[in-house]
Amino acid sequence: MHGPLTIAALTIHRIAIPMKLKFRHAAADRAESEPLILEIELANGVTGFGETHPRRYVTGESADDVVAAIRDFFLPRLVEVRPANFGEAIAAAAELPTHDDAGRIVTAARAAVELALLDAYARAFDRSLESLAGWISETDLGAPGSRSTVRFGGVVSACDPAAAARSIRKMRLYRLCHFKLKVGDGNDQPRIDAVVRALGRGLPRGKTTLRLDANGAWGLEEAARRLTALEPLPIVCVEEPLARGHMDDWAALSTRTNVPMMADESLVIEADAEALIAHGAASWFNIRISKNGGLIPAMKLALLAARHHVDVQLGCMVGETSILSAAARWFLQQVPNVQFAEGNFGRFLLAEDVVSRPLRFGFGGRWKPLTGPGLGVRPETDRLRNLAAQTPMYLPL
């Protein structure tokens, strides 16, 4: 046992990292990664790091909103955090709210705070994040999770059909098997046709898989028309065919198509998951650690999905650094039956990273598990300084 260990200070790092490829989908274009990285320093000098990627079209939060939420809403709560062991630190992280005092969703901000808190205290108490599994569920979570079954896959942006086909062929050379294609514009069908041709006979045989992601671009009638047209194709599912906040339309669409639907932007908090399940609206959940508020809420969503026979994909935000890539691996190491995984692109996508040896999946989408203490990766001060988009905000407690 240790004595109570308080937090001394927070530092908010706003980062800008060029991406090697411009990424486009129905909701946004992105040529630069803009992660917000939170550093927590404990009273004994130990530090931990968390990362988030706020998106207004996902959780309603901007980068400025996240900074304000950390400074004005979460910081006063962290003053009271003083665990004597890692179990108490997990409990403190689990109690972090998903809404601020005005009722606004703050899951992107929560994710940064939770990850930094867990990383700092796991290092201080010399523990790994594998302890999360037993704290959340003694029977349903834990090693090896999806370690032996899930492989990272490729994501193709809403580019022209020829470029989409080239991307598929390049990723197939690296023996990736699982792919997601962004749709939601007037060029959808030619792009889908080009990708299906590039995947060839392996697609109907199940050696490769294809998912589509509309990012909420369609209304009910257009979605019904599009999904009906897709039924002859071997598509695993269509992600976010309708926008968030249209639950009745989601329920109606599920009765008008045989194409499985995956909820993403419509799945932010636990109440969203419960509504989707109650309406029979989605047979897939796309869980993203930054979107859903951190590792603990993400793992709880996965448990809820399993209890209701909803399949799970671990998604990512475009441009994640190795901090969130590490969190993704801890999720996969402890959550069983994850069907697809996105992210861990490392230097495949980013020109730089905040660590010297970026996490990146290997040949065929394979990956190695992490060990503690903490997240298992350490951002470097020089890299944070060189990649800074603004002067870091230092907040003593």
Image (cartoon, rainbow, N blue to C red):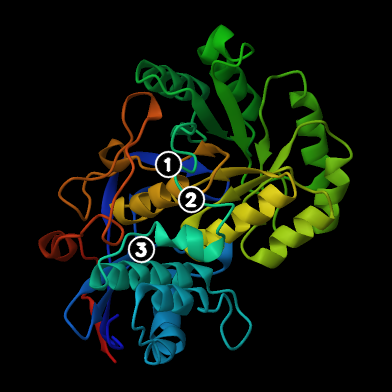
Would you call the spot at circle 3 few (<14 residues within 10 Å), some (14-19), or many (20 or more)? many
Residue linked to disc 1:
23
Residue drawn 61% across the image and 62% down it: 268
Image-quadrant location for residue 90: bottom left
Which of the two residues, 320 or 284, is positioned nearer the viewer here? Answer: 284
For marks 3 and 1 on the same chain, the one whose residue lies earlier in the sequence: 1
Q: Residue furthest left?
A: 382
Element at label 3:
strand
Residue 116 horizontal/vertical position (percent): 34, 70
Q: CA distance from mark 3 to mark 2?
A: 23 Å
Q: CA distance from mark 3 to mark 1?
A: 20 Å
Residue linked to disc 2:
142
Q: Which mark is residue 51?
A: 3
* Total numbered labels placed on residues in the image: 3
Report the quarter where the N terminus lies.
bottom left
Say above or below: 52 vs 65: above
Residue 193 horizontal/vertical position (percent): 61, 18
For marks 3 and 2 on the same chain, the one whose residue lies earlier in the sequence: 3
Residue 44 horizontal/vertical position (percent): 18, 83
Residue type at numbered disc 1: Phe
Left or right side of 111 for 196:
right
Can residue 327 be seen in this snapshot?
A: yes
- Which tag is nearer the camera, tag 2 or tag 1? 2
Element at label 2:
loop
Left or right side of 99 for 155:
left
Which of the two residues, 330 or 208, is positioned nearer the viewer here? Answer: 330
- Which tag is nearer the camera, tag 3 or tag 2? 2
